[in-house]
Image: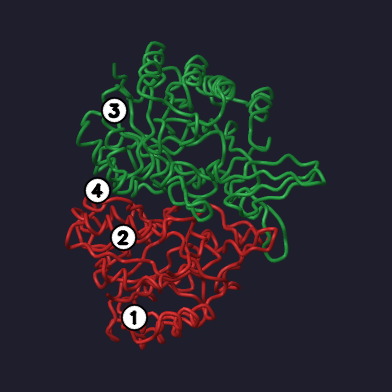
Amino acid sequence: MLIDTLIITNNETGYLIMELVCPAGNLPSLKAAVDNGANAVYIGFKDDTNARHFAGLNFDAKKIEQGIAYAHNKGAKVFLALNTYPQPDGWQRWQYAVDQAGELGIDSMIIADLGVMDYARQRWPEMNLHLSVQGSATSYEAIEFYRRQFDIKRVVLPRVLSMKQVEQVIKNTDVGIEIFGFGSLCVMVEGRCILSSYVTGDSPNTFGACSPAKSVEWIDKPDGGMDTRLGGLLIDRYNADEKAGYPTICKGRFNVSSNTYHAMEEPTSLNTLEMLPQLLAAGVDAIKIEGRQRSPAYVAEVTRVWREAIDSCQKSSDDYKTKADWMDQLDKVSEGAQTTLGAYHRPWQ
Amino acid sequence: MKLSLGPILYYWSKQQVEDFYQQVAESPVDIVYLGETVCAKRKLIRTRDWLDIGHKLKAAGKEVVLSTLALSEAESDIKTLKRICENEDFLVEANDMGAVGLLEGKPFISGHSVNIYNHHTLALLAKLGLKRWVMPVELSESTLKDMQALKPAHIETEIFAFGRLPLAYSARCYTARAHNLQKDDCQYRCLDYPDGLLLNTQEDQKFLNFNGIQTQSAQVYNLLAELDSMKNMGIDIIRLSPQAMHMDKIINLFHQQMHNTLPLDAAMAQLEKLTPSGLCNGYWHNEAGIKSVALS
C-alpha cells in the first residue's frame, strides 16, 4: 500500500501539519519510532548504498518488508535512503537497490546522486523522490533544478543555513522542505565533506560512513587519559577527568596559531526544539531526527519528546513553550551532552 | 593535453590579484578560471573586475572561464550567480547544482565540487549542456579510467593536479573562529593568510588549512609524476590551483614536464621546495588522501 505524501492542513490552526521523520537502524528501532509517534521512518540497506553503512546496522529485504507492514498498519510511512555516490564499478549495486526498494513498496526514496535519481525516476515513475541532504542543495535554484529534472517531492536541507535563509528557500520553491531538528551535528555541507577520506580513504560519499570504525583507535595512557586517533592521526587527547568522544575530525582538538582548541566545532548535538513555532510558521514540512546508528531506546525517547512538542506547537503555536523535562530527556541522549541551534541561529556561524 | 589555472581560492588584495594575472598572461597556461568561489563576503574584486581581468587574459591568448561560488546561501549569492551565468563573454564553471540549473541548455563546465562520481551522472549533465567536467578530488586513477571509457565522447576531462585540496565547506568561518570572531564580523581576517591558516594535530603533524569557510588539506596534492599516464588516458586538461608564492615556477615545471624537457626526479625535487607544507597523492592511488605514495 502506498501512502500519499500530500501535505495536510490542520483545520483548527490553519498551519500545515509538520511531519516527524525518525531514524531506524534496525527493526526494533523502526517499531520504537512508529510506536512513539513518528509519521515516517527512514532506513537503509545493509551496504554502501546509504550514508550509515555501519557493521551490524540496517535492513535486508525481509526486514524491510516486516518494517513496512508494521509502519503502514499504524499509519506511518517508510523512506529508504540511497544517498551515497556510486562509482562506475559499483553502479549495479545502486541500480539493484533502487529496484528492490521499488518492489518492496517503499513510500519514498531519499537519493543524492544524479545518476541514481535519474534511474529511479525512469524505472519507478510514480515513486516519491526526496533529495538527500547528501545532495548538498542549499539554494532554491539548486532545488528547482532537481524538481525540473526529477519531479522531487521533498528536499532535506544541509545544516548550514540560517533560519532566514531557510525561509527564503521555502518562499521560492514548491518542493517540500525537510530540516534536521535533532541529533549529531554536521558543521560541513553534507555531500561535500571529504575530511574522512583524506585521513582514512573512505568518505560518506564513497563508502557511506564518516570516520569508519575500522580506522578508529582509542589509546589508554598511563596517566588515565586517552588519545583518539583516526587513520593513525591524532584527533583528540583527553585528560583522565574528561570523557573521550568518537574521533570525528570536525569535533577534534587541534593546534592553530599555537592555540589548542575545538577548531571547527565542540562535540555538541543539534536541538531546535525551541524554534518549533518559527519552523512551523515558515512552512517547514518535516523535521528529521538524526541517528540511525543509535539504539532503539534513543529512537523511542527522542521520538516521544518530539511528537509531544510538535503536537503541542501545532495545537497552539503562541502558547508553545519547551518543557524542562523534554530538554532534560534530549540532553541525556545528546552527543557531548550539550546542544546548540547550529547554523539556524546566525551568531553560531 | 592543456594546462589550466584554477580560480584563486584565497583572499588576496586587488593589487596582488592584478599582478598575479599579469604574470599569468605571460605564462604557458592555456585556460584560466576566474572568480570568487569560496566566500561571498570577499568583495575587493567585483564581478565587473573579474570580467575586466578576463578580457585582458583573453587578449593575451588565454581561454577564460568564470567560476561560481561553491556554497550559495543568501539571496545576494544567487543574484551574483545569475549575473555570472548570464554573461555572454565567457564560459562558466558551475560549482554547485544551483549554477548547473541556471546554465542548463547552454555549454558549461562543472567544477570539482559538483559531485560527478559515475558515467550516468556525466551522461545526464552532458544532455543538459555540460562540455567539460573536473573530476571530484577524492576519486582515483582507477575510477578515472572507467569514466574515460564510459563517458560521452565529446566531453572533456580536467584533473585537479596541483594544489591544496578543497576538502569541505561550512556555514561557519574557521578563520574568523580562530580569532574569536563571528562570521558576520570576520574583519576580513582571510586577507592576513594569503595561503590559508595552517592547522596541526596536537603532535604537531601538519594536517589541514583553513581558508574561511573552506577547509583544505595542509599537504599539496601533486600529480606531476602522473602526467604521462594521464596523457595515455586521454585526459584533456591538467589543473593547477594557485598559491601565493612561486606559481610562475610551478606552472613552468608542469609545462616542462608535459613536454618532457625536464627529468621527473629533478622536477619533483624542485617542486618540493616551492610548496609550503609537503606533498600528497593518496587519492590518486585510491588511498587516504593525505598519503604520499612513492613513485614506482
Q: Quadrant of residue A324?
A: top right
Up-down relation of residue A131 to residue A261 (above or below): above
Up-down relation of residue B172 to residue A38 (above or below): below
The answer to whether A272 appears left or right of A5 in the picture is right
Element marked by disc 3: helix
- Which of pointers 4 and 2 lies earlier in the amino acid sequence? 2
Q: Amino acid at mark 1?
A: Val
Q: What residue would you read off at disc 4?
A: B120
* Mark 3 vs mark 2, CA separation in Å: 32 Å
Which class describes the residues within 10 Å of circle 2: few (<14), some (14-19), or many (20+)? Answer: many
Up-down relation of residue A313 to residue B84 (above or below): above
Q: Quadrant of residue A247?
A: top right
Say which residue appears at 27% left-offset and 84% top-offset.
B61
Percent from the top left, x then y, of residue A191? 43, 47
Which class describes the residues within 10 Å of circle 3: few (<14), some (14-19), or many (20+)? Answer: some
Q: What residue would you read off at disc 3?
A: A100
Element marked by disc 2: strand
What chain is tagged by disc 3? A
What chain is tagged by disc 4? B
Q: Amino acid at mark 2?
A: Ser
The answer to whether marks 4 and 2 sit on the same chain is yes
Percent from the top left, x then y, of residue A5? 33, 25
- Which of pointers 4 and 1 lies earlier in the amino acid sequence? 1
The answer to whether marks 3 and 2 sit on the same chain is no
Q: Do tag 4 and tag 3 residues touch (Cβ < 8 Å)?
A: no
* Mark 4 vs mark 3, CA separation in Å: 19 Å
Chain identifier for the green-coloured part of the image: A
Image colour assigned to chain B:
red
What chain is tagged by disc 2? B
The answer to whether A275 appears left or right of B257 in the picture is right
The answer to whether marks 4 and 1 sit on the same chain is yes
